[in-house]
């Protein structure tokens, strides 16, 4: 594709979503939160009673997703599910359906369709490796497990949810393990990705680093 794009991959709670949204806004580009598609698939499975082990059922649910992304919200079948897909239970289910090859295949074209002019910023686990291997700039955003658990904890508390730091840390490590050890499109830095460690950076500093790398490329 000749449409410019930036791929941002990294482990759960590394800040990819926030950074991708800021960079997209700065450039005036489209945004793809690919994790939302796996979360939507998970939510559909949970609601339809499809088990995480039911490959064909989960793939069918992924293919049948009726989603619309608007400004800050996500709609599924006309219903605002923005809050539902952020639940921990849905995130855990998402990382289980994400190991299934037929699910990943069902979501491939849907993701690539987001690449339209003037450009795209996409965040996930396999943006630079599988979905957009020809991305113009690939970033692998990392942060220590402790820093990520702290951020997630703060986020949940601010939204009025209850949270336990140790439980979050354990869930995060379990999800990291599942994402990096799976056979299909495991979480990994593309060979041509730039690694950015945000453990000790603010959101603004992280965005500036991405913008500066983009400036050097274009
Ligand atoms: O990034 P987020 O936490 O919203 O993603 C939810 C789950 O979806 C992840 O734990 C991961 O297993 C899966 N995922 C994926 N590939 C992507 C994006 C997300 O496998 N590109």
Image: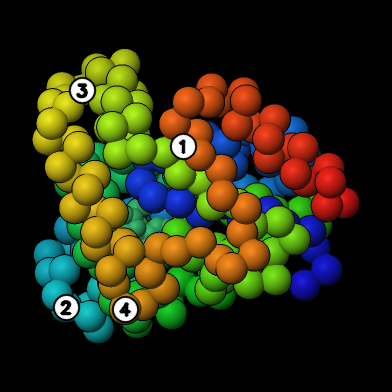
On screen, 196 above or below 60?
above
Q: Residues within 10 Å of mark 3 (few under 14, many from 20)?
A: few
User: How was this image coloured?
Assistant: rainbow
The CA span between labels 1 and 2 is 31 Å
Tell which circle, 3 or 2, labels the residue nearer the N-terminal end: 2
Tell which circle, 1 or 4, labels the residue nearer the N-terminal end: 1
- For residue 54, the mark is 2
Q: Which residue is mark 1?
A: 15
Tell which circle, 4 or 3, labels the residue nearer the N-terminal end: 3
Q: Which residue is mark 4?
A: 183
Q: Residues within 10 Å of mark 2 (few under 14, many from 20)?
A: few
Residue drawn at (59%, 68%) of the image? 191
The CA span between labels 3 and 2 is 31 Å
**Frontmost residue, 140 versus 33:** 140
Q: Is residue 191 visible?
A: yes
Callout 1 touching callout 2 (CB < 8 Å): no
- Image coordinates of residue 103 in percent, x first then y, are 35, 75
**Frontmost residue, 137 versus 100:** 137
Ligand 1 in which quarter = bottom left
- Name the front one of labels 3 and 1: 1
Mark 1 and ligand 1: say if the CB distance to the nearest ligand atom is below 8 Å.
no
* Left or right position of 196 against 1: left
Q: Is residue 34 visible?
A: no
- Image coordinates of residue 31 in percent, x first then y, are 62, 48
Q: How many numbered discs sit on the rendered protein?
A: 4
Q: Residues within 10 Å of mark 1 (few under 14, many from 20)?
A: many
């Amino acid at each position: 594709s000749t449409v410019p794009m930036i791929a941002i991959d990294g482990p759960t709670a590394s800040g990819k979503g926030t950074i991708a949204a800021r960079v997209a806004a700065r450039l005036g580009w489209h945004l793809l939160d690919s994790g939302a598609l796996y979360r939507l698939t998970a939510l559909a499975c949970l609601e339809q009673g499809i088990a995480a082990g039911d490959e064909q059922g989960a793939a069918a649910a992924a293919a049948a997703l009726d989603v619309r992304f608007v400004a800050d919200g996500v709609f599924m079948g006309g219903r605002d599910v923005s809050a539902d897909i952020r639940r921990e239970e849905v995130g855990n289910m998402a990382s289980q359906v994400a190991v299934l090859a037929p699910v990943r295949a069902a979501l491939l074209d849907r993701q690539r369709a987001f690449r339209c002019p003037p450009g795209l910023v996409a965040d996930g686990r396999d943006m630079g490796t599988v979905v957009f291997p020809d991305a113009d700039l690939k970033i692998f955003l990392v942060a220590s497990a402790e820093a990520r658990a702290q951020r997630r904890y703060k986020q949940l508390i601010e939204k009025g949810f209850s949270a336990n730091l140790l439980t979050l840390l354990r869930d995060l490590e379990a999800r990291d393990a599942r994402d990096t050890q799976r056979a299909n499109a495991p979480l990994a830095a593309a060979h041509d990705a730039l690694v950015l460690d945000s453990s000790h950076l603010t959101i603004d500093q992280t965005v500036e680093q991405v913008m500066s790398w983009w400036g050097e490329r274009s």
